[in-house]
Image (cartoon, rainbow, N blue to C red):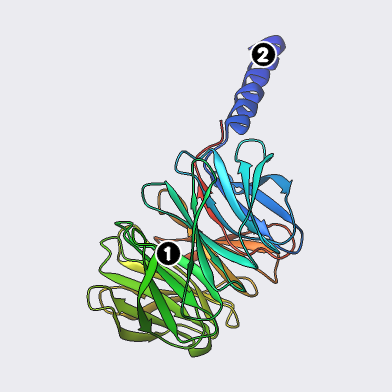
Amino acid sequence: MSSTALRALAMLAWALAAAGALAGGPRAYVPNERAGTISVIDTGTGAVVAAWRTGDKPRGIVVSADGLRLFVTEQPDGLRLIDARTGESIRRIALGASPEGVALSPDGRLLAVASETANQVVLVDAERGDRLAAITTEGANPEHAAFSPDGRWLYVSAEDAAQVDVVDVGARRQVARIDVGRRPRGIAFSPDGSRAYVACELDDALHVIDTAARRAVQRIPTGAFSNGVTVHPNGRQVFVSAGRAAQVSVVDAASGRVVASIPVGQRPWNMALTLDGMQLYVANGRSNSVSVIDTATLERVRDIAVGDGPWGVAMGKAAR
C-alpha cells in the first residue's frame, strides 16, 4: 500500500474516532459541592468530558426523563435547571432553606426536594419548573426523598430522627412514620415496591422496610457510617456505601446477607448505576473521585478524578 493510501486511512481512522468522541455515550453527572461544579463523565470511556460551573454547593442531582435537563439542588435555597447538552443554566427556583436530595417521579413529571432547615419536602413540576407544594414532615432535618415505583408515596429520611416519614403524593401530606435506626440517610426501593432500604449512618446498618406493613423487618450491618443506597434493576443486589469504612457493601436481597465489601475512595457518599446496570459509580467526597464498580464481578475497576467534594451521581442518556 502506498504512503498516500496509508495517510488517507490514518486520516479516516482519526475522523471516525473524533466523531465517536463527539457523539459520546451515556453520561454520569457528578456535583462537586466545594468546587461549585458538575463533572461530566462519558461512561463508555470513563473520561471526564466537561466541568460546568454552577451556583454555591451543588448537592442533589437528577436527570429529566428525556435526558435533556439536569435538576441540581444548591445551597443556600435553590434548585437549578441546567441544559444537559451544554451545561448552561436554564432557570433557578427558590425552594427554602438548605435543599439536599432531589428525586424524580417514575413518570418523570414531579420532582421532590428534601429541604433540611425548612423541614419540608417541596414538590416541583419537572416540565414547567413550577413549585407545586411544600409538605411539612414530622422528622427533623429531612435529607433524602424517594418515590415508590408506582409514584404514590414519598419516603423521606429524617437525619435528626430515627424514622422515615411517608408522604401521600396525591394528597400532599404525611400519612405515616416508620421507625428505623439512627440518622437515616439514603433510601431506595426494590423494583416491585415491596421493600424499601434505608441506610442508617449512626447504626452502621441497612434497615429493610416492608412497605405493605409499613414497618422495618430487618437490620443488616453494612459498615461504619452507612449512607448511600442503590438497588440493582434486577432487584437481587443492594449496594450500600459506608463513609467511614471507605467501602461499598453488596447485600443479597433474598438472604439479607452481605456478600461482598468493596474498597473505594474516602468518604463514599451517594451512588448511581449506569443505565445498563453493569457499573456502579460511587462519589468519594474526600478523595475527589468517583470509584467505578463492575456489578458482575463486584470489583472496583477504576477511579475517576473529579472536582472538589463530590456529593453524588446521576445518570443520563448520551448528549446530542
Any part of residue 300 in sight: no
Task: In the rendered view, tell whether residue 179 sits above or below residue 192.
Answer: below
Query: Which quadrant of the view contains residue 268?
Result: bottom right
Residue 133 lies, in percent from the top left, at 48, 58
Residue 144 lies, in percent from the top left, at 50, 69
Q: Is residue 76 left or right of residue 128?
A: right
Label 1 element class: strand
Residue 87 lies, in percent from the top left, at 67, 41
Any part of residue 310 in sight: yes
| 69 or 226, nearer to the observer | 69
Dot label at residue 8: 2
Label 2 element class: helix
Dot label at residue 23: none
Q: Is residue 95 left or right of residue 185?
A: right
| 218 or 7, nearer to the observer | 218
Q: Amino acid at mark 2?
A: Ala
Q: Residues within 10 Å of mark 2 (few under 14, many from 20)?
A: few
Kindly check if marks 1 and 2 are in contact, taking CB atoms under 8 A apart as contact. Answer: no
How far apart are the alpha carbons under marks 1 and 2?
54 Å
Which residue occupies 49% across, 46% down? 126
Q: Quadrant of the N terminus?
A: top right
Q: Amino acid at mark 1?
A: Ala
Give the residue pinned by disc 1: 146
Q: How many callouts does the rendering have?
A: 2
